[in-house]
Amino acid sequence: MTERAAPLPGSIPDRLPENAPQAADFDPRAAGKELLRRIRAGTLATLDRNTGHPFASLVNLGTDADGSPVILTSRLATHTANLEADGRASVLLAETGKGDALTHPRLTVLGSFAPVPREAPDEARLRRRFLAHHPKAQLYAGFGDFAFWRMRVVSAHLNGGFARAADLEAADVLTDIADAQDLIETEESAIDHMNDDHGEALNLYAVKLCGAPAGIWRCTGIDPDGLDLANGPLSARLMFPERVTGAGALRVMLKQLADRARAA
């Protein structure tokens, strides 16, 4: 008899009905990925370094190219001191809107945070991606006591509303980037090109394909799964119908999506 593997953090295998059918229009993996990329602020829960009690605080969120959550914190913050003692943490990303808050989807991502040294080769990418989502953070991102921390995701739990819960593994919400180095290396120039020369297309993506209100939408991130868009405090996520791993394929995909948006 094989020993049963321990459940992942945050999972509730003894509470959810086994093999319970999901709603036909509910795709937990797609919904979890969309929330992880689109929600820009969330509740960070760390373990208090003095007593072990859960300590919740509000933080701005960004993502690395693969979707790993990224935060920018000061060494003066309590949650930073907690992470320095024990990196285990979770982040709650919640949709907001009218009516009962519990009817809106939310995702809890669990894992361990580790600091990214300023001399690390990927720090510049994390900094650029984070500040694209949070431009006002440029006021303090360069201060000596601030540093980026990236989560190594272990699991996630999605609650999409009534009868729409799902336990997810890291691979369910993260993006495979093993074959996407070309796209990662050209992301910055592609974003600049879209923002400088294709503002109309970005607005069409947001309004026609994402259902967002019209405005001055800008591209803030590109990864194999989709495009991140922002308009002031508003954000949208345009999912690609198929994976994109290189600059050439990205140009083709963006043209196809623009044509689809115009037709809509």
Image (cartoon, rainbow, N blue to C red):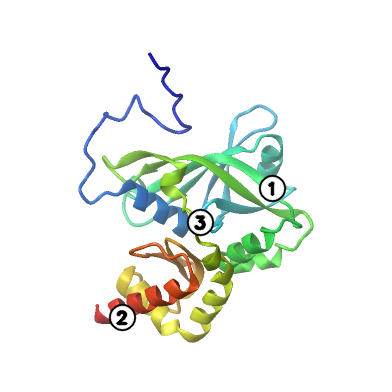
Above/below status of 21 relative to 15: below
Q: Do the residues labelled 2 and 3 touch (CB within 8 Å)?
A: no
Q: Quadrant for the N terminus, please.
A: top left
Residue denoted by label 1:
115
Q: Residue 177 got which mark?
A: 3
Q: Position of residue 189 (x, y in %)?
A: 57, 76
Compare marks 2 and 3 and give the one earlier in the sequence: 3
The structure residue drawn at horizontal position 66% and vertical position 27%, both measured from the top left corner, is: 51
- Quarter holding the C terminus is bottom left
Farthest top residue in view? 1
Q: Is residue 221 above or below residue 106?
A: below
The disc labelled 1 sits on which kind of residue? Pro
Which amino acid type is shown beneath numbered disc 3? Ile
Left or right relative to 182: residue 258? left
Crowd rating for badge 2 (residues with CA inside 10 Å; few <14, some 14–19, many 20+): some
Observer able to see residue 20? yes
Q: Are marks 1 and 3 in contact (CB under 8 Å)?
A: no
Q: How many marks?
A: 3
Residue 11: quarter of image:
top left
Mark 3 or mark 1, which is nearer the start of the sequence?
1
x and y percent of residue 2 in the render? 40, 17
Write down the residue under mark 2.
Answer: 259
Cα distance, mark 2 to mark 3?
A: 27 Å
Query: Farthest bottom residue?
Result: 197
| Circle 2: residue type | Asp
Q: Which one is nearer the viewer's eye here, 56 or 259?
A: 259
Secondary structure state at the residue bearing disc 3? loop
**Left or right of 23 in this view: 55:** right
Q: x, y percentage for residue 52?
A: 63, 28
Residue at 57% across, 49% down? 58
